[in-house]
Amino acid sequence: MTDQVIIFDTTLRDGEQSPGASMNTAEKLRLARQLERLGVDVMEAGFPAASNGDFEAVKLISETVRNVQVAALARTSKGDIDRAWEAIKNAAHHRIHTFIATSDIHLKHKLRMTREQVIETASEAVRYAKSFTENVEFSAEDGSRSDWDFLCQVYGAAIKQGATTLNLPDTVGYALPDEFGQLIRYLREHTPGIEKVIISTHCHNDLGLATANTLAGLKAGARQAEVTINGIGERAGNTSLEEVVMSLYTRRDLMGLTTKIRTEEIYPSSRLVSMVTGIVVQPNKAIVGANAFAHEAGIHQDGVLKNRMTYEIMEPKTVGLDTNRLVLGKHSGRHAFRAKLTELGYDMTQEEIDRLFEKFKELADKRKELADEDIEALVAEQILRVHDVYELGYLNVVSGTVTVPTATVRLKIKGKEVQKAGFGIGPIDATYNTIAKMTGSKSKLLRFTVSAITGGMDAQGEVSVRLIEDGLVALGKGTDTDIITASAKAFINGLNRLEYLKTNPTLISDDRRL
């Protein structure tokens, strides 16, 4: 059996199912290019049958990236499979990924099908997909809660029709590591022809065990891991790519398995996903969190200074964190700025670099030094944002202990300038009330978080908001040295994303979950 683990990244598909994490086509393409640089073996670019927007994004990605397999998800219906193939047919390396639920609870309450019908449907779907491409993956949704012998029958039927990869999803994050590993071993021992195919894992993190279950599956004989950057995805998320890859890298002595991932691209990939989706990486997140390589306790600091290995099992440079960073300021030139963008993993056009450099100089006049996080915030705000329906032109806020908080706002709405003033219980509330009136938004604020991007009194503030309107959820982000201005930018960014969702519906039905 090979010791090479196939990394199947589903950030663009399952990761996008995180509430409010929908991406537009330009954002998906930029992320796809970064995944190619990262070295994933397969990227699941989307679910083409879900919407025209998803179809176009998958098609564009398929025609752009050339050194990675591009997979498209499809239910076990000819319509879905036709749509999937149409989207990926121009890929240099393509894969159709089809699925149907196999647990009794899904058969009874969702599919309303018998086991025999499920086997027949799965067989027909794999056979039909095989008529387009040799590379067909079949998934048994909710496999970890399915009858083990029935799973063997379904997988056996898929193998007979030509499936090349069999995926075992722990769809609701229910399994425990020993149990999941045992199930993989059972499938290997009792499924006819399974030695001809790759066994895959797809674990969710509802009990915080996605990485543990994936590693248990790999140890039991699976050789593909389905993962997402930062572990984003439905509910509590998916298996984290960086956790699986670095576990295999760090514990080669125990696992004896390798991947083709360029580990130094892990951190840039994490930052890009965070900026594109607006989902902040928690500070104590393994591998890529802000505190992952930070040491505050005196004993730890003393040990690390004497020998890193006392308290660090990985070197920061291994995952793309360089402790000796080039600091940019107002005297830095265009060449140094371009070099910094390249170092951070961004592949920019000259037009994009010129636009960013102008904004960089404006910010550098306000701050003495700019850290990597400041540059990344500029990229997020200037390059990765959706097409703006609303643009902030002017903001003036009056507030204090003896005055009613008042905000005067000038917005450009579809190119036309509008100005109004409004009140609130605080400066940010006054700003949001005024913007909501100007845009006619009926959205509700579900979450508001503020943090400093870097240290120092002149640090930029980063504000993240989550908005909901008519069932659509969108995240907005804004940065500025003035926290009230950053709050206004975040709100407007969220409103622009809501407008994008209204015209490009990407809400995901239960049928898309694995």
Image (cartoon, grey):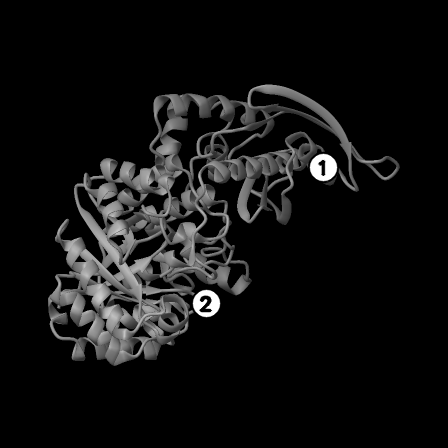
Marks 1 and 2, Cα distance to the nearest angstrom? Answer: 37 Å
- Secondary element under disc 2, as helix, strand or loop, is loop
Q: Amino acid at mark 2?
A: Asp
Q: Amino acid at mark 1?
A: Asn
For the N terminus, give its image quadrant: bottom left
**Which residue is label 1 attached to?**
433
Kindly identify which numbered label has been placed on residue 206.
2
Residue under the image location 18 percent in, 59 percent down: 126
For the C terminus, give its image quadrant: bottom left
The quarter holding residue 36 reads: top left
**Is residue 385 at least partly visible in the picture?**
yes
**Is residue 460 at least partly visible in the picture?**
no
User: Is residue 360 toward the left or the right of residue 172 in the image?
Assistant: right
Q: Position of residue 302 (x, y in %)?
A: 49, 61
Q: Camera-side residue: 26 or 336?
A: 26
Tell me if residue 146 comes above or below residue 110 in the rendering. below
Q: Camera-side residue: 390 or 270?
A: 390
Q: Position of residue 203 (x, y in %)?
A: 36, 65
Estimate how packed mark 2 is, as few (under 14), some (14 to 19) or many (20 or more) residues with alpha carbons within 10 Å. some
Q: Position of residue 140 (x, y in %)?
A: 28, 67
Residue under the image location 64 percent in, 37 percent down: 441
